[in-house]
Amino acid sequence: EKGGYASFMLKEIAEQPKAVADTLLGRIDTAGRLTLDEVRIPAAVLREADKVVVIACGTAFHAGLIAKYAIEHWTRIPCEVELASEFRYRDPILDRRTLVIAISQSGETMDTLMALRHAREQGAKVLAICNTNGSTIPRESDAVLYTHAGPEVAVASTKAFLTQLVACYLLALYLGQVRGTKWGDEIHAVVRELARIGDEVDRVLETMEPVRALARSLAHKDTVLFLGRHVGYPVALEGALKLKELAYMHAEGFAAGELKHGPIALIEDDLPVVVVVPSPRGRSVLHDKIVSNIQEIRARGARTIVIAEEGDESVAPYADHLIRVPATPTLLQPLVATVPLQVFACELATARGNEVDQPRNLAKSVTVE
Ligand code: M6R
């Protein structure tokens, strides 16, 4: 049951610190090494893989987009991410050295299932990242890495998304460990950080009241735009998807670098634009570019809603609303930056009188193609 929350979605948002911790449980040993014994794909196969292809739909696809940054950075294996519904219809190039990762909360999404069947027919090895024990996708895969989010009832995916990210990071780190690529201080620092990220998510949840108030004040708006770069770009897409499915608003996510290639023409007076700012410490060039983007859109009238790391003062003069998230390694930022966007969408939907757990026209798992 809802355990005192007004909706399953609110309950599931609140359960995220535990879901994240449960998904990490028993998978990092005391020496900071990954112990994914349950990934039954032999190490030799993982060592020889020359390409990773991630297939998924909706929110799980956004987790896949983020996984690409982690996999390529930590393992140096080329990684493609594709919507499962597009994948098999374009005759993708797959062979025995391709590792396919199918991400699905329900394990029953037909598009993802058909794509993984196609991949296996071509000889690729398929590893599922799934939240539902014994469901079809893991049963039909060569191996499975379960997320331990617990049952997700609300149609909008929240805690499953965060645990999909954790599973993707674990898998990317594990691939790096098995292949001996980039295994050093940087990786150990990430593993240490990952081990305590549940607490950071908890801290974010404690500071959400201003986000809720902001959401309520925007309930009459027609459009909200979301901008991000690097791993913040899929976070922007996820924020927009949440708003579409829950608040039935026009919401779009863009890569901030694309602004001047078209989307900036959409900016008009008082248009809410959410900007996910990368850490100033990691890829600082990107950070500075996004701060310029914020200035550019603000000069054209946008109402800027800025999600930035604690201590990043450079954004303050250009933020109409500033949402702080804890500092994390660059690649892990989506785990904290997504949470305010979930709360924002849920509150906006409620303010508009929508049914948050059961949005119109949607089903929890899409079992038709
Ligand atoms: O069960 P799956 O993870 O395979 O579902 C994929 C999508 O249908 C799902 O993430 C959908 O986009 C959610 N409603 C998003 O909140």
Image (cartoon, rainbow, N blue to C red):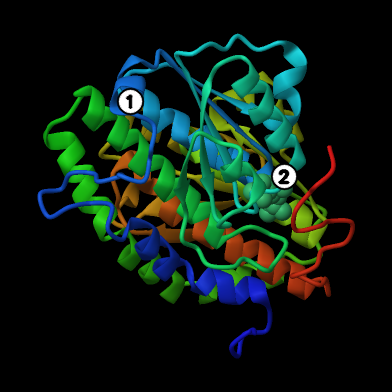
Badge 2 marks a residue whose secondary structure is loop
Q: Could you tell me if residue 233 is visible in this image?
A: no
Q: In the displayed structure, does residue 21 sit left or right of residue 67?
A: left
Under 8 Å from ligand 1: the CB of mark 2?
A: yes
Q: Residue at x 62, y 22 (%)?
A: 119
> Which amino acid type corresponds to the residue marked 2 in the rendered image?
Thr
Dot label at residue 73: 1
Determine the CA span between mark 1 and mark 2.
29 Å
Mark 2, residues whose alpha carbon is within 10 Å: few (<14), some, or many (≥20)?
many
* Contact (Cβ within 8 Å) of mark 1 with mark 2: no
Dot label at residue 109: 2
In the rendered image, the vertical position of residue 92 relative to residue 209, given as above or below: above
Q: Residue at x 69, y 67 (%)?
A: 154
Q: Residue at x 71, y 38 (%)?
A: 267
Q: Could you tell me if residue 159 is visible in this image?
A: yes
> Mark 1 or mark 2: which is in front?
2
